[in-house]
């Protein structure tokens, strides 16, 4: 090693100063980053404030009162009737039908993928389900109207099933939500420790018994969370019902007739030229606020369940 | 199972359990197959709608346009131009000339114009692909019987012309150029809002935020926002961008007074609304990418006396960037497919001019699909099917680029 | 050479306790690090060696909820004082980690970036070359300066990390088991290098290798989990290395040192 390489190039300033120097650049950047983080809070506040404000205005309009809204079954804005039930029942109908499809299928898919499928099968099937989840909902709407509805009409008769109906929308919504439920359920199943499965196999249980009687119960809260998120998603889903479930509120429990859901109603009302401060304008904020509160509540419950579930196994 | 069974009974029991296992195994498998079948059915159904026979009648009989016994098919470009000049109003003729001088147009293009503007074929009936393939003879017979004057052609609704033509109320000449450009303009502003703020928020939460209640609230809030229905964002966008910030989003603030602009219902409002919608997704994905950068790298940087931002900027971000970009692309493809919030924000129902500035009226591909799907006539459903194919190809290429990015840059440590 | 030689010790700790949350990982350490010498910290796994070492340049702060009580003085100045900037401390007290961690950049950039962030305005090629020379790596990499630092062997990577650390000429270099991931030949290289570096720098090294400590260091601090039942580490003996290895005062030191020698 040459002599010169060992000498220090230069020495540091003699007076050592460890004092904090203001780094203005760093501080500005930190401020910007904080603002970015805080921005999401502003979005929530914006939603609560704007929706709340207009919803209040809605309930102050002449002819609107909260009690009538929650107790009557006619939603006819042109005659000042704002009973939310027809919108609510159709939302419940489509959600119910969707979950009827999505829960059993989604759970079966999850059990199959996590307990039965070989890694190779899993690695081909999962992307397919992801594709299903990535297709825009308007495409599902088209599918409901041009594929599912004709099939339903073929099966149950054209005079029974209307062109627009909640059944077709609900079924297709179930397909849309299936991948969501299956992937969340699969996460829950795969979080169940291996030792638990081995314990069950060790006493001679079959694969089915291990899967259904040991793994699924152990992952139950994770599965519950998946189902709740699925319900929340179904309630907020819009384009399928806007296209296929029919226009015009209709207080009915038949899946074969057209009935407008909350989201479908908002889309139809705002599709035209909505003038500010009209009763229609204010009503969509009231409905939006209602949707927001319901879905938020469901999501919070689901997250709380997931957190509890994690605590058990970590 | 736990009974004190004799040996044979025990063996029978096992048989039963096994059989049950097989049955359920098959059931689980079938459920999975149902998901795949649904995907295939969905795609086939779209393809089924996008191709097939179409019967159309001319509003003006082409035979009446013959000059000295020469049918228009055989006429020269000059004759066709003259025909256009005499048949169209001078305003319409001049407008066409202005768009592209007739001198520069080929005979083919002029012929196309004659068909579109003078003969104006009108669709009388369309068939989907499957019947077109299996019942061609019947279809031909029906058309001859019901619409003797009609032409029957097998068409693909999805053509290059379809992608490059502007919107139109005539199914045979309608295209999605306006909608595609509208989608691209909108997405530009979505990215401008969501990317910097999203990545900034992710950096804040992963690298700067201390463990305290306030930052926990921010994190929880982001998770919750990701689950808010998209239509609620539409309502928020209507209240904030369209109404409250109208001066800004309509361009009035910048002295732009555009008679065709619709108050605040502009590309800018739409893009920002979708920006708010995908922001939580961008943040969550970026956080994951940043978290994947190993701690040893940060230690190396801090160990030589780098500041926080120097560490983040020079080491954390470059190494997290492929993941951040992948996540952002996925979020963007979500935005490109969104319909409901844009309807609420006020997408235009019929515009045939391309968006040209942030303050233009807008329509997007999904909005176009929605409008065509909602029309009762079958020919518009065919247009919807063709535009769905365009949308799916767009999304597919976006996702493919995300996958490529991920595979190319994965595992550097 | 040493511009702060008015202080006898480069680093001194006084009654230093180090916590992770409420867990007290290190208790009551009083240690003096001699200038231009190599000080080794030895002791069984989990007794807080890394924790103590990281406290010397405030790297500890980067770990969730760690805190200290007592103080650590660098040239007589308390580095945990309110007004002290940890970045300044780390600028003067460099660190080499157990697992080589070059930046995923070129060999050249590993050093150039480090110099640049500290405002180095001179000729970049010079500082890269001289740092690599001092780390005894130059001859092996001079033809591939623009290849990724990750393309080097483990031993070369570690010397690159040392080159990177000394490029900004700290006064102290902290090394946490710098050779534990290396083979014996690479280890020997690092040890030779330390002897060279000692002329210009003060080195504190954590090691599990008794021979290494005996061979390479001038002073040795022996750490153990303290006796009082807590799972908390402390320095039980600190002396010249020869004393520690030939004539330890504490029975536990003797057991540990001889046990290792077999
Ligand atoms: N980031 C941390 N958070 C909480 N506790 C920690 C953390 N790092 C270390 N500890 C705890 O502090 C104690 C001392 O750990 P330290 O890593 O300093 O030991 P060590 O002597 O370096 O061990 P080794 O020889 O295995 O490297 C251990 O009980 C360890 O569990
Ligand atoms: Mg250690």
Image (cartoon, coloured by chain):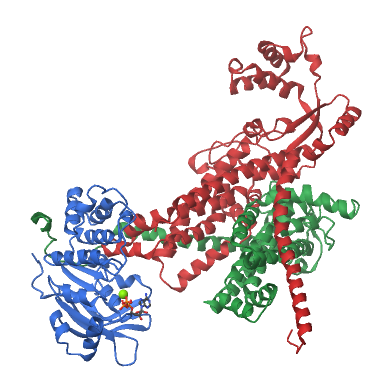
Chain colours: A green, B red, C blue
Does residue A313 appear anywhere in the picture? yes
Q: How far across and down, in percent of the image, does residue A264 sit?
A: 73, 55
Residue found 76% across the figure and 22% down from its top: B119
Q: Is residue C86 above or below residue B279?
A: below
Residue found 39% across the figure and 65% down from its top: B208
The quadrant of the rendered image in which ligand 1 is seen is: bottom left
Q: How far across and down, in percent of the image, does residue B174 sit?
A: 69, 33
Q: Is residue B192 above or below residue B135?
A: below
Does residue B170 appear anywhere in the picture? no
Residue B230 relative to residue C169: left or right: right
Residue B50 relative to residue B271: left or right: right
Q: How far across and down, in percent of the image, does residue B139 sit?
A: 86, 33
Comparing C199 with C216, the one in front is C216
Q: How far across and down, in percent of the image, does residue A295 sit?
A: 65, 65
Comparing A85 with C100, the one in front is C100
Which quarter of the figure is the N terminus of chain B placed in? bottom right
Comparing B264 with B62, the one in front is B62
**Extreme top residue here?**
B68
Rendered image quadrant of residue A101: bottom right
Which quarter of the figure is the C terminus of chain B placed in? bottom left
């Amino acid at each position: 090693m040459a002599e010169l390489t060992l000498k220090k190039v230069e020495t540091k300033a003699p007076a050592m100063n460890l004092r904090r120097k203001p780094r203005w650049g760093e501080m500005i950047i930190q401020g910007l980053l904080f603002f970015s983080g805080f921005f999401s809070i502003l979005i929530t506040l914006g939603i609560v404030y704007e929706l709340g404000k207009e919803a209040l205005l809605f309930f102050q309009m002449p002819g609107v009162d909260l009690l009538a809204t929650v107790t009557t079954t006619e939603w006819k804005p042109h005659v000042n009737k704002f009973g939310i039930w027809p919108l609510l029942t159709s939302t419940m109908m489509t959600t119910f039908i969707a979950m009827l499809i999505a829960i059993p299928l989604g759970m079966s898919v999850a059990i199959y993928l996590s307990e039965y499928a070989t890694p190779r099968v899993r690695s081909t099937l999962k992307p397919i389900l992801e594709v299903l989840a990535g297709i825009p909902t308007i495409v599902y709407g088209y599918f409901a109207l041009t594929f599912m509805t004709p099939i339903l009409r073929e099966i149950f008769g054209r005079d029974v099933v209307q062109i627009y109906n909640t059944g077709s929308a609900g079924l297709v919504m179930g397909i849309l939500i299936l991948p969501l439920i299956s992937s969340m359920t699969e996460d829950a199943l795969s979080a169940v420790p291996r030792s638990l499965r081995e314990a069950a196999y060790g006493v001679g249980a079959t694969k089915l018994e291990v899967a259904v009687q040991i793994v699924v119960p152990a992952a139950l809260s994770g599965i519950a969370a998946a189902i709740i998120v699925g319900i929340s998603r179904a309630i907020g889903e819009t384009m399928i019902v806007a296209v296929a479930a029919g226009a015009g509120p209709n207080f009915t429990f038949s899946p074969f007739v057209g009935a407008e859901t909350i989201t479908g109603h908002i889309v139809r009302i705002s599709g035209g030229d909505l003038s500010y401060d009209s009763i229609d304008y204010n009503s969509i904020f009231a409905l939006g606020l209602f949707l927001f509160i319901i879905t938020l509540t469901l999501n919070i419950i689901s997250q709380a369940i997931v957190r509890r579930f994690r605590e058990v196994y970590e | 199972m736990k009974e004190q069974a004799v040996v044979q009974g025990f063996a029978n029991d096992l048989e039963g359990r096994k059989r049950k296992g097989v049955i359920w195994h098959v059931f689980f498998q079938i459920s999975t197959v149902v998901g795949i079948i649904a995907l295939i059915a969905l795609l086939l159904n779209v393809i089924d709608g996008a191709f097939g026979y179409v019967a159309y009648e001319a509003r003006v009989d082409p035979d009446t346009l013959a000059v000295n016994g020469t049918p228009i098919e055989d006429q020269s470009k000059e004759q066709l131009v003259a025909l256009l000049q005499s048949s169209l109003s001078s305003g319409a003729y001049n407008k066409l000339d202005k768009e592209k001088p007739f001198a520069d147009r080929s005979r083919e293009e002029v012929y196309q114009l004659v068909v579109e503007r003078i003969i104006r074929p009108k669709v009388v009936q369309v068939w989907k692909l499957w019947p077109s393939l299996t019942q061609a003879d019947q279809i031909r017979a029906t058309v001859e019987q019901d619409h003797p004057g009609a032409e029957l052609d097998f068409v693909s609704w999805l053509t290059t012309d379809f992608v490059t033509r502007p919107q139109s109320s005539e199914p045979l000449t309608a295209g999605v150029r306006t909608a595609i450009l509208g989608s691209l303009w909108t997405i530009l502003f979505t990215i401008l809002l969501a990317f910097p703020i999203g990545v900034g928020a992710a950096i804040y939460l992963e690298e700067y935020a201390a463990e305290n209640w306030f930052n926990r609230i921010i994190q929880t809030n982001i998770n919750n926002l990701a689950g808010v229905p998209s239509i609620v964002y539409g309502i928020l966008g209507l209240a904030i961008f369209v109404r409250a910030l109208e001066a800004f989003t309509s361009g009035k603030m910048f002295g732009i007074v555009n008679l065709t602009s619709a108050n605040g219902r502009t590309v800018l409002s739409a893009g920002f609304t979708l920006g708010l919608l995908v922001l939580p997704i961008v943040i969550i994905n970026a956080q994951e990418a940043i978290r994947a950068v190993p701690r040893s790298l940060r230690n190396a940087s801090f160990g030589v006396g780098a500041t926080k931002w120097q560490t983040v900027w020079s080491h954390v971000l470059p190494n997290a960037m492929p993941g951040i970009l992948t996540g952002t692309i996925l979020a963007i493809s979500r935005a490109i497919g969104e319909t409901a919030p844009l309807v609420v924000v006020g997408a235009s129902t019929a515009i045939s001019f391309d968006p040209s500035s942030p303050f233009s009226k807008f329509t997007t591909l999904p909005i176009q699909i929605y409008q065509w799907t909602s029309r009762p006539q079958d020919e518009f459903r065919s247009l919807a099917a063709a535009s769905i194919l365009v949308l799916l190809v767009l999304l597919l290429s976006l996702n493919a680029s995300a996958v490529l990015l991920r595979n190319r840059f994965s595992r550097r440590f | 050479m040493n511009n702060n030689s008015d202080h006898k010790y480069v680093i001194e700790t006084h009654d230093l306790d180090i916590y992770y949350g409420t867990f007290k990982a290190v208790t009551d350490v009083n240690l003096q690090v001699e200038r231009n010498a190599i000080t080794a910290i030895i002791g069984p796994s989990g007794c807080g060696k890394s924790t103590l070492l990281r406290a010397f340049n405030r790297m500890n702060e980067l770990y969730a909820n760690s805190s200290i009580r007592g103080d650590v003085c660098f040239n007589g100045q308390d580095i945990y004082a309110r007004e002290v900037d940890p970045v300044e401390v780390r600028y003067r007290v460099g660190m080499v980690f157990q697992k080589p961690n070059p930046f995923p950049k070129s060999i050249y950039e590993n050093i150039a970036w480090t110099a640049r962030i500290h405002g180095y305005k001179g000729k970049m090629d010079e500082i890269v070359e001289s740092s690599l020379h001092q780390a005894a790596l130059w001859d092996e990499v001079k033809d591939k300066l623009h290849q990724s630092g990750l393309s080097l062997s483990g031993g070369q990577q570690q010397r690159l990390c040392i080159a990177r650390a000394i490029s900004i000429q700290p006064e102290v270099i902290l090394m946490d088991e710098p050779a534990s991931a290396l083979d014996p030949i690479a280890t020997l290289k690092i040890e030779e290098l330390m002897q060279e570096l000692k002329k210009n720098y003060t080195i504190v090294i954590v090691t599990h290798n008794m021979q290494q400590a005996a061979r390479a260091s001038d002073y040795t601090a022996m750490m153990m989990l303290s006796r009082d039942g807590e799972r908390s580490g402390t320095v039980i003996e600190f002396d010249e290395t020869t004393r520690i290895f030939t004539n330890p005062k504490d029975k536990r030191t003797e057991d540990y040192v001889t046990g290792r020698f077999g």
